[in-house]
Image (spheres, rainbow, N blue to C red):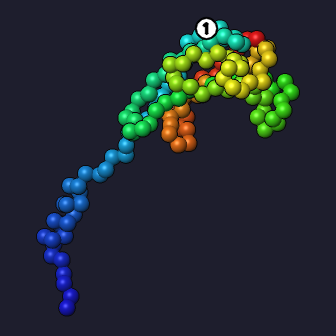
């Protein structure tokens, strides 16, 4: 036994499929970061202004990761391409460039090219923004 859809039934099915709202993609989370310190220098604190727009999921949070490079200096870790100092902290933290108290530094003075990243956690960090800057030695 075969059944047929009448013209009215087809129209009703089409009307329902059109009337069901499409699920919107979640709003994208974006961010900005800017350097507050006018003349960043080795062993001096730098701070940043950050902002995030969009709705964070429960448990999500922002962090700032700062890394500084001196590609012309010898580095015992060849895969780090001149990385001499790095630190991860909360967005409102003051980062003391090259500070050995952070636990890891090869920076012994001189100028360095640095980048501050605004990352979203947890899990694999999602970079929302970055700001490059030069620190004098």
Whole-percent x, y for residue 56 in the image: 40, 35
Tell me: 52 left or right of 76: left
Which residue is painted at 46% across and 32% down in the image?
61
As drawn, the residue found furthest toward the right would be 74
Q: Nearer the viewer, residue 62 or 136?
A: 62
Q: What element carries label 1?
A: loop
Q: Is residue 95 visible?
A: yes
Which residue is painted at 74% across and 24% down in the image?
105
Whole-percent x, y for residue 6 in the image: 15, 76
Q: Mark 1 points at which residue?
A: 38
Whole-percent x, y for residue 62 in the image: 49, 30
Image quadrant holding the N terminus, namely bottom left
Which residue is painted at 45% across and 23% down in the image?
51
As drawn, the residue found furthest toward the bottom would be 1
Q: Is residue 134 visible?
A: no
Tell me: 46 left or right of 25: right
Q: Which of 13 and 58 is in front in this view?
A: 58
Image quadrant holding the C terminus, namely top right
User: Which quadrant would residue 86 be assigned to in this image?
Assistant: top right
Which residue is painted at 37% across and 46% down in the image?
25
Whole-percent x, y for residue 41 in the image: 69, 11
Tell me: 14 left or right of 124: left
Other-residue count near label 1 (Cα within 10 Å), few / some / many at <14 / 14–19 / ≥20: few
As drawn, the residue found furthest toward the top would be 39
User: Which quadrant would residue 82 be assigned to in this image?
Assistant: top right
């Amino acid at each position: 036994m075969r059944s047929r859809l009448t013209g009215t039934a087809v129209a009703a099915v089409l009307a329902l499929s059109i009337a069901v709202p499409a699920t919107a993609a979640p709003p994208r989370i974006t961010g900005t970061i800017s350097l507050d310190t006018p003349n960043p220098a080795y062993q001096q604190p730098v701070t940043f202004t950050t902002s995030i727009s969009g709705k964070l999921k429960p448990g999500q949070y922002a962090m700032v990761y700062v890394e500084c490079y001196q590609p012309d200096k010898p580095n015992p870790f060849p895969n780090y391409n001149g990385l001499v100092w790095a630190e991860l902290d909360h967005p409102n933290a003051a980062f003391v460039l090259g500070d050995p108290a952070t636990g890891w530094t090869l920076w012994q003075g001189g100028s360095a090219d640095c980048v501050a990243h605004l990352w979203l956690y947890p899990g694999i960090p999602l970079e929302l923004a970055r700001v490059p800057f030069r620190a004098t030695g």
